[in-house]
Image (cartoon, rainbow, N blue to C red):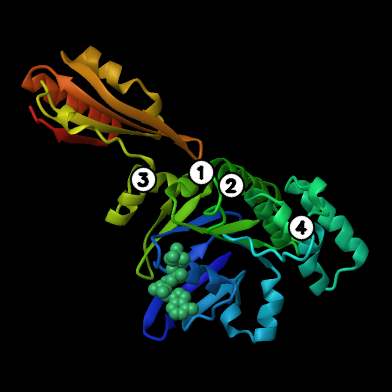
Amino acid sequence: MIDIRQVTKCYNHVTAVDAVTLTIRQGEIFGIIGYSGAGKSTLLRCLNLLERPTEGNILMDGKDLTALSDKEVRKERQKVGMIFQHFHLISSKTVFENVAFSMKAAGKTKEEIKIRVQELLKMVGLSDRSGHYPAQLSGGQKQRVGIARALANDPKVLLCDEATSALDPTTTKSILNLLKEINRKLGITIVLITHEMEVVQNICHRVAVMEKGKVVELADVYDIFANPKTALSKQFVQTVHSLELPERLLTGRKGPIVQITFQGGSAEEAVISETLRQFNVNANILHGQISYIQDQPLGTLIIELIGSHTEVQQAMDYITERTNRLEVLAGVA
Ligand SMILES: Nc1ncnc2c1ncn2[C@@H]1O[C@H](COP(=O)(O)OP(=O)(O)OP(=O)(O)O)[C@@H](O)[C@H]1O
């Protein structure tokens, strides 16, 4: 468990992180999202004291890292692995040597290193690339080496600094799947920063949204998609879940156009067909999508409801009662 208590980091006159308090739970995948300059990297680097907070404390499993000397911090840092957007591999060393590097520094024997590196390369799917140099690898393969290297000293926590931002969408997916597998199989806590909501949707259990050095929203990932509270979270959610209707569809309709959000159980019920059976209205489907976040369905549907004023109103009340989320987009009857 990582306890971040009132952490502030200032650079001269810039407050990069501003009094952040949050707890990252053991074994979760925790996302930190924000636009460029929000303070994500600085906060992440404070977690293993690559940056010393100007104020506040970082507690890892109850131990206050900010109270330790630099030497003690270096020892504690071995419990935390880190992977980077641009991989940071040593170009003059082979894949094997890159992964082995920090194990040597930690005092492991040659035999221990050999066995462990082979294990790690197998886990990241690179057993056949052991003797290759970074320049001979694709971006995805380089990141796999980065992940193997980060796991070399059996860390409890893995920090990921925009780990997939330099990769294409397919490679991104495979790296995210690998991180998910590592989290599930090894129980390692993962903290990742990103500016892509798709990454959060794909892999995270909880997310903190950052703006100007502060955490403006903290929620389970499903909840942030189903019910984003701040304008910034809404913007991020819309980058993944946006049902934009052409302007011409919003005008000249016969009835109101409503957007319905189906969450959890309601996404699997036949709310619309039951509405049509109970009330004398027709529904014209204009747009819709259903996503699965942490295996939970989240659906959005935009329909035009056609019928008498009273029946349409009753139908809307019924849908609201069943789904909790109905928003009139245009043409109230
Ligand atoms: N070493 C530094 N010296 C001075 N200012 C810094 C330093 N590192 C970060 N900053 C400033 O702190 C603020 C937050 O930067 P940070 O890199 O943490 O944001 P970020 O959300 O990670 O952005 P990005 O996604 O672009 O990396 C920015 O205004 C940045 O210019």
Sequence order check, earlier mark of 1 and 4? 4
Give x and y (percent) for residue 91: 72, 64
Sequence order check, earlier mark of 4 and 3? 4
Please name which of the two marks, 1 or 4, marks the residue nearer to the observer.
4
Sequence order check, earlier mark of 4 and 2? 4
Report, in whole angstroms, how far the alpha carbon at label 3 lies from the one at label 2: 19 Å
How would you rate the neighbour count of disc 4 (Cα within 10 Å): few for under 14, some for 14-19, many for 20 or more? some
Sequence order check, earlier mark of 3 and 2? 2
Query: Quadrant of the image for the N terminus?
Result: bottom right
Report, in whole angstroms, how far the alpha carbon at label 4 lies from the one at label 2: 23 Å
Sequence order check, earlier mark of 2 and 1? 2
Q: Is mark 2 within 8 Å of ligand 1?
A: no
Give x and y (percent) for residue 65: 60, 78
The three-letter amino acid code for the residue at tag 3 is: Thr
Q: Residue at x 76, y 64 (%)?
A: 153
Q: Which mark is residue 239?
A: 3
The three-letter amino acid code for the residue at tag 1 is: Asn
